[in-house]
Image (cartoon, grey):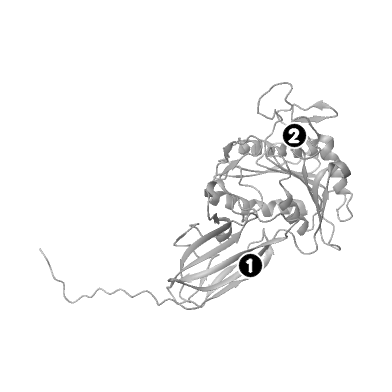
Amino acid sequence: MLSLLSGTACTTEPPPKASTSARIEIDRPTALVDEPIRIRVAGLRPGEHVTVTSQAVDHEDLGWSARAQFTADGKGAVDLARQRPVAGTFRHVDGMGLFWSMRPQRGEADESWFFSDAPARKPSYEVRIAVRSGKREIAHRVTTRQWRADGVRHKQLTVADDRIDGMLFLPRSGASRKAPVLLIGGSEGGRSFDYEAALLASRGHPALSICYFACKGRPKELRGIDLEYFARAARLLQSQSSAAPDGLAVLGASRGSEAAQLLAQYYPHLVRDAVVLAPGTRTFSPGGGSAADLVSWTRAGRPIRLDPIPLNRVRGTVLAVAGKDDRLWPSADAAASIAERINASGTRHQALIYDAAGHGGAGVPYQATGRWMSHPVSKQWIDLGGTPAADARSKADSWPRILQLLDR
């Protein structure tokens, strides 16, 4: 039965007419890559639907992009730090979502990682922010993200000339002296922390990213690596005129976390603090087995077999950062174990553990990362766990705390 209702009217307001222009406001158009920036779009019509996009090009000239759809507020503005997107590559209020949620133009997003040109070659990269209303782009602006700030110097070190393979970054001349930082990568081998070293030098820390295996003049495998090699690197770094005395820190990730802990434990006169990302707490063979001839680390020519690595002689603090969804190994349990132990003065070490983050959930924030990694040594694809959003949140929270420890 059809009924007619009289005396009532159902009206819907038409969507606002699309704007032909807008204004993109960025509080710091040029900033270090770990610095969040404020992006606001103004000059829209109240209630207008717009899409804000980001675009960047990686070191292989592959384009990356992210997007988020918003509804302008009553003043005709969109503030990315305050408004939740209606749809897009990220779904929660996040002023830096357009950066970490970028995805490549080709290939699987979960298997792709954004890397700009090496900081020794190119200090920064650009991200183009644009606004579309309807079918038209109505505004765009470019922001520069710096790995290496103006004035930061760098020097390539070789085993032949320096008895170390590494890239040394030094703060600009005249900068106040801060704790130097020695950076140690994981089982991927090579030199994987050049970006972080450049960034830390931009923040005033003399920083040295070293290769300890799988590079010229060094062992081909993570086997029989002598702690004396790292100690030599630490002494070279501490000797820099821009280094604050008596405060060297070592930052190690994954398998490199073992070397970082061992250095802090056995060389307290050289190393004050250690930051360990996705850490372990024991030394074991490169393949995870227990064969007597497969020893990862040595000291004074003798193999190191420890479970767990003791931390009672550490002069400063070991800060562990891990995610509970780490699918490579139980780094969250390792981090909790580290935080239960005390240093030489009786003070507990520290841990930051994030529920939904994976093996890649620690380090410099706001970078687009995947969940799967093709291991350069084993040639196998590895599930790191976590999600891009969860890893982004854990890095945004933990990185400032890491810097606070290094700056003390």
Give the quadrant of residue 101.
Answer: bottom right
Q: Along the horizontal axis of the image, is 351 left or right of 300?
A: left
* Disc 2 packing (10 Å; few <14; some 14–19; many ≥20): some
Pointer 2 residue? 220
Mark 1 vs mark 2, CA separation in Å: 40 Å
332 lies above or below 389: above
Disc number lying in front (1 or 2) = 2
333 lies above or below 202: above
Percent across and percent down for residue 142 are 61, 69
307 lies above or below 388: above
Compare marks 1 and 2 and give the one earlier in the sequence.
1
Residue situated furthest left in the rendering: 1
Can you see residue 270?
Answer: no
**Circle 1: element type:** strand
Percent across and percent down for residue 109 are 53, 50
Q: Assign the N terminus to one quadrant of the image.
A: bottom left
Q: Nearer the viewer, residue 32 or 137?
A: 137
**Residue 14 numbered mark, or none:** none
**Circle 2: element type:** loop
Pointer 1 residue? 143
Percent across and percent down for residue 325 are 55, 41
Can you see residue 27?
Answer: yes
Residue lying at 77% horizontally and 54% vertically, measured from the top left: 407
| Circle count | 2
Give the amino acid type for the residue marked by disc 2 in the picture: Lys
Give the amino acid type for the residue marked by disc 1 in the picture: Thr
Residue situated furthest top in the rendering: 292
Percent across and percent down for residue 339 are 68, 39
146 lies above or below 110: below
